[in-house]
Amino acid sequence: MTRTTPKAEFSNTWQSQIYDVLKEFQIKHMAYVPDAGHATAINKFEADNDVTSVVLTTEEEGIPYLAGASLGGDRGVLLMQSSGVGNCINMLSLQNNARFPLLMLITMRGDWGEFNQWQNPMGQATEAALKLMGVLTWRVDRPEDVEPLVRGAATMAFEGDQACAVLLGQRLIGKKEWTK
Amino acid sequence: MGKVLLKRRDVVAELLKDRGDTIVVTGLGSPSYDVMAAGDHDLNYYLWGAMGGAAMVGLGLAKSRPDHNVLVITGDGEMLMAMGAFATIAVQAPKNLTIAILDNGYYGETGMQLSHSGRGVELDRVAASVKFDWAARITDMAEVKDLRRRVHARNALNCAAISIDAEEVERVLPSRDGVYIKNRVKAALGQKI
């Protein structure tokens, strides 16, 4: 390619690295509750005919959906916000009991520089809540850590049938995203 | 004449007759026992918990295995916990998925408290309102036979609320080992465990 367009530059961002890594892991299903921090991956998956994109009414639905897809032999990912983690708690017993692979990529609210304090209680409890239910977690606050941590979590989810969550911190996403 | 309500075990036995390679997902509680009573099968995925998850497991299966019939057999209480899933499933609209709700209007496992459907909420009309291809209330065996035909036709997203009586029947328990049940389904579908 000879052109250097803003689009080409954009494809090197951590946002689009998430999509690239997930494609490398042959993700066939992307379940999500819409979120600005995940907008790039959501748009790319929605435009990808090899991937089934499933918009959920609540994050909880994503867990049995991906369990079903896994029973059928496919890999998937759940893209969501930290505020949705509380919605998933009992449903995580499905992963716990049946050891389905589960990969959750979670954009944080109530984490750093949050303008809306209503987000803080769940944001502050997100990582602990996931750990209480047996989900392995990693935090990312720097762009250069996104690719290796998503790759590592995907490896452990799909090779070892583990429930894994990568938490994308507000320092990474930037608080500008959240103030309109 | 007064309508005689269907018996849950008769309904499930009819739905699973000559099932072929239909994959069945069961909601926790009585539907799991009913499906087990009709005969254990490698392509049965029994839930013992994760209440509200049965229909979404079915959706994941239907989307990943478009070459199979997927039949979710669950109860009214379990499906009431998945009201949003009606909308999520309708948006995907797989033609190989049928949700059969054994609707007695009660929470049977917890001591027969009236459920919302027992208080007038019509789950088949919820499915119709979010635009399932086909949704109906079923009250007799001829309609159950027709539903079975629909499961195998694989040409529509279906939801039936099946009026059954609230009589308690003997529990026939499937395995509670989630990993075993999972691996059995995957092996039956030809996957490496």
Image (tube, coloured by chain):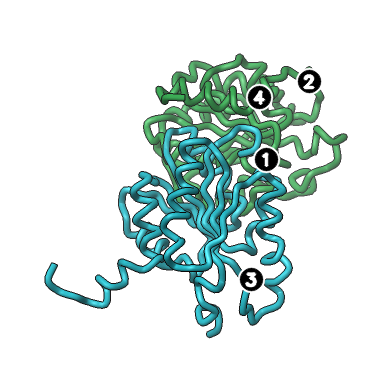
C-alpha distance separating marks 3 and 2: 51 Å
- Observer-side mark, 3 or 4, equals 3
> Contact (CB < 8 A) between labels 3 and 4?
no
- The residue that disc 4 covers is B177
Asked whether, in this view, residue B60 is left or right of residue B46, the answer is left
- The residue that disc 2 covers is B169
Residue at (53% x, 85% y) in the render: A180
Q: Which chain is cyan?
A: A
Can I make out residue B142 in this image? no
Q: Are marks 2 and 4 on the same chain?
A: yes
- Observer-side mark, 2 or 4, equals 4
Q: Quadrant of residue B48?
A: top right
Mark 4 crowd level (few <14, some 14–19, many ≥20, 10 Å Cα): few
Label 3, secondary structure: give it.
Answer: loop
Earlier residue among tags 2 and 4: 2
- Identify the disc placed on residue B127: none
Earlier residue among tags 1 and 3: 1
- Identify the disc placed on residue A111: 3
**What subunit carries mark 4?**
B
Mark 3 crowd level (few <14, some 14–19, many ≥20, 10 Å Cα): many
Q: What amino acid type is highlighted by mark number 3?
A: Asp
Location of residue B161 in the rendering, given as x and y in whole percent from the top left corner: 63, 39
Q: Quadrant of residue A163?
A: top right
**What subunit carries mark 1?**
A
Residue at (59% x, 22% y) in the render: B180
C-alpha distance separating marks 1 and 3: 26 Å
Label 1, secondary structure: give it.
Answer: helix
Q: Which chain is green?
A: B
**What subunit carries mark 3?**
A
Q: Is residue A114 above or below residue A45?
A: below
- The residue that disc 1 covers is A93
